[in-house]
Image: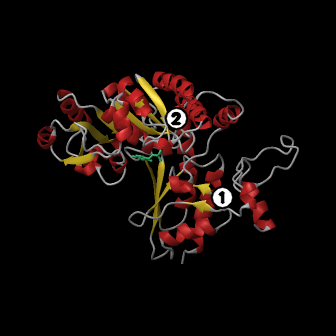
Amino acid sequence: MKRRDLIKYLSVAPLAGGLTGVPFKSAAASTALKRDLIQELGLRTFINAYGVYTTHTASLMPEEVMEAINAASKKYVLINDLQDKVGEKIAEMCHAESAMVTSGCWSALVLGTAGVLTGMDKTKVAKLPDVSEFERNEVILQKTHSGSYDHALTNTGIKRVFVETAEEFENAINPKTAMTWFYNEAAPWGKIGHDEWLRISKKHKIPAMVDIAADVPPVENLWKFNEMGYDLVCVSGGKAIRGPQSAGILMGRKEFISAARLSAPPGGGNIGRGMKVNKEEIFGMYAALDRFVKLDHGKEWQMWEDRARVILNAVSKVKGVKAEIFVPPIANVTPTLRISWDQSIIKLTPKDMTLNLRNGVPSIEAPKSINDAMILSVWMMQPGEEKIVAKRFAEELIKASV
Ligand SMILES: *Cc1c(COP(=O)(O)O)cnc(C)c1O
């Protein structure tokens, strides 16, 4: 970064540590100059206008979470004791019977399914993913709910059975049906809603699992699906909750959580052995959830809305620009920007805008366009960064205006 750019950047970013990605501390707070690994490794950091995505390292862990992780790293505990205690606390916070920390929502999906398949039978645990001789080895889901995350279920060896209507659903249930699976984000795309799905699952006494990985906020979703009657609920820990990105939560009926733990470390050679969560991640997940549940969510929302408005106001001043704030109905439910422009008077494609923002100083990551509009997410920015994004976005638009 040129000195001139640096001064310009610092003048608009009093709080942002965007240069290195390391949170900015006053000089007095750190006497010795810390080793800068980001610089050492020559990595690019950026302002996250993209949102919560694994490719972009999802979210930043708050101070409370890092404190929990650091404290945990200095003591030994038994991993099973820790899962018991943290599981109890998580269950209490989320109005569930029981809970465990998993390695991401993905492993919650795998281990939860494993628990349903094996129960407390250790011979069955050892057999996974060979379920050919299991009495029950099928999972029913709606066709519209398939396509990505349902793949996790197949890690256990189960066969997926796809249905479209409630009638098909009832007819598909047979003595081999082990579980039913609902993908919450896909709720509007399927013909069967939560109530009917649960009614039919319960009528036939088949446990139902729901994937709500990215569906907080609202915070109430952490207990809504437990209260609705799902037997297992799977959530990501490193998205909105801002725990370790490698952590997640499996919660629900005690019998299934206890069984799921048999397929997870430290149980020796089981299908979950590669899904280890270390004590730091378990403590970090707990601290993150505790913080998240207690947050003033109204204030958070206001902050996101204010950020979005800063960007909206800046880009709206440019002739030919159309910008609005919208809220996605499910998943990533936060004030989000949709910005498009008349490309006959602003000679820039959204794809080039994305590249220019990425290659600018400081670097900004924003998603590529959907239908020629750019979607900007503000909730994963650090305070003050919205001003930089507003300025850079408007600059690029003006530069390309004829
Ligand atoms: C992100 C996501 C997952 C995977 O979660 P991880 O925490 O990254 O393992 C699963 N399902 C859905 C719907 C997701 O959005």
Observer able to see residue 49? no
Q: Which corner quadrant holds the C terminus?
A: bottom right
Q: Quadrant of residue 250?
A: top left
Count of marks overlaid on the render? 2
Q: Is residue 173 left or right of residue 154?
A: left
Callout 1: SS: loop
Q: Amino acid at mark 1?
A: Thr
Which of the pair 287/395 is nearer the observer?
287
Q: Amino acid at mark 2?
A: Pro
Callout 2: SS: loop
**Which numbered disc covers residue 92?**
none
Q: Is residue 215 left or right of residue 49?
A: left
Q: CA distance from mark 1 to mark 2?
A: 35 Å
Give the class, few, some or many, for how many residues have Cα within 10 Å of label 1's Cα (few <14, many ≥20): many
Residue named by callout 1 = 45
Which of the pair 352/286 is nearer the observer?
286
Residue drawn 70% across the image and 29% down it: 75
Residue 337 horizontal/vertical position (percent)? 48, 54
Residue 356 horizontal/vertical position (percent)? 59, 70
Q: Is residue 147 left or right of residue 219?
A: left
Q: Which corner quadrant holds the N terminus?
A: bottom right
Eyeballing the image, is 361 above or below 153? below
**Which numbered disc covers residue 266?**
2
Q: Which color scheme did the rendering employ for the protein?
A: secondary structure
Which of the pair 116/388 is nearer the observer?
116
Sequence-first tag of 1 and 2: 1
Eyeballing the image, is 56 above or below 110? below
Viewer-side label of 1, 2: 2
Eyeballing the image, is 48 above or below 252? below
Residue 253 horizontal/vertical position (percent)? 36, 25
Observer able to see residue 230? yes
